[in-house]
Amino acid sequence: MLICGVDDAGRGSLLGPLVIAGVSLKPSKIKKLSSMGVRDSKKLTPAARERLYEKIIKYADNYYIARIHPKAIDRSVKKHQLNLLEAKYMAKVISKLKPNISYVDSCDVNPARYGNEIDKMAKSGKIRSYHHADSRFVIVSAASILAKVNRDRAIAKLRKVHHDLGSGYPSDSKTIDFVANYVSDGKAVPSFVRKSWKPYKAMLK
């Protein structure tokens, strides 16, 4: 039997990928995650996340990480289907891991509806969908760490070329200034910027 946890990172970002990660383990191995120090990635320092990332991928029976490109995100936002896009990629992760039961962090206001959506596409075991699953279930916490580190590495790679990128989030003035400079200069905005996001649309006005 395998139990899987699935979580995302970068959903609210103005640029860079949305990352979905899944971790699967035999039930007898899950308890050890807590003693390793695994918890919700938001409650850990970047250094702790990096350290745990390496431990998790070695300890897990299996794991899978998928990145969703900003262009795919923009297409889905225009159709008001961002939740559906995320459900589709969570289903993809679960299909790859083939667990008996999966715990997923729901981005939908209705966790049951979100779980049913994934269930239709994954066709692999039972789906348990909850709000704040990353802080409620250590297996989802493990997935949240893989997603967050993978996302941070993607941004770090972009930052090597674009030094003034910031964190990528709209709350970061460096990120806003980075995108605004392209818009005000009339230059083509990089493909890693999410053009369907409200901050970007506000700049165009």
Image (tube, grey):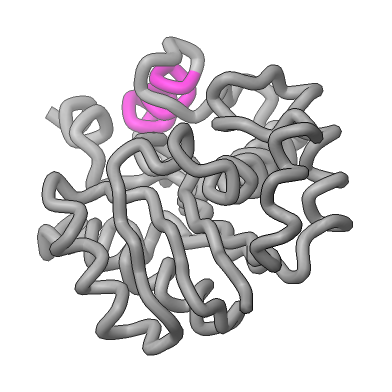
Residue pictured at 55% horizontal, 31% vertical? 40
Q: Is residue 54 left or right of residue 37?
A: right
Residue pictured at 54% horizontal, 25% vertical? 42
Does residue 101 sit above or below 68 in this rendering? below
Q: Main secondary structure of the magenta part?
A: helix
How many marks the image carries: the answer is 0
Expressed as whole percent of the image width and height from the top left, the position of residue 73 reads 33, 58
Does residue 29 sit above or below 11 in this rendering? below
Q: Compare residues 49 and 17 and report the one nearer the observer.
A: 49
Expressed as whole percent of the image width and height from the top left, the position of residue 74 reads 28, 57
> Which image quarter is the C terminus in?
top left
Expressed as whole percent of the image width and height from the top left, the position of residue 102 reads 46, 66
Residue pictured at 44% horizontal, 85% vertical? 124
Q: Which stretch is magenta?
A: 175-185
Q: Is residue 181 magenta?
A: yes
Does residue 20 sit above or below 192 in this rendering? below
Q: Is residue 7 left or right of residue 55?
A: left
> Which image quarter is the N terminus in?
bottom right
Residue pictured at 64% horizontal, 66% vertical? 24
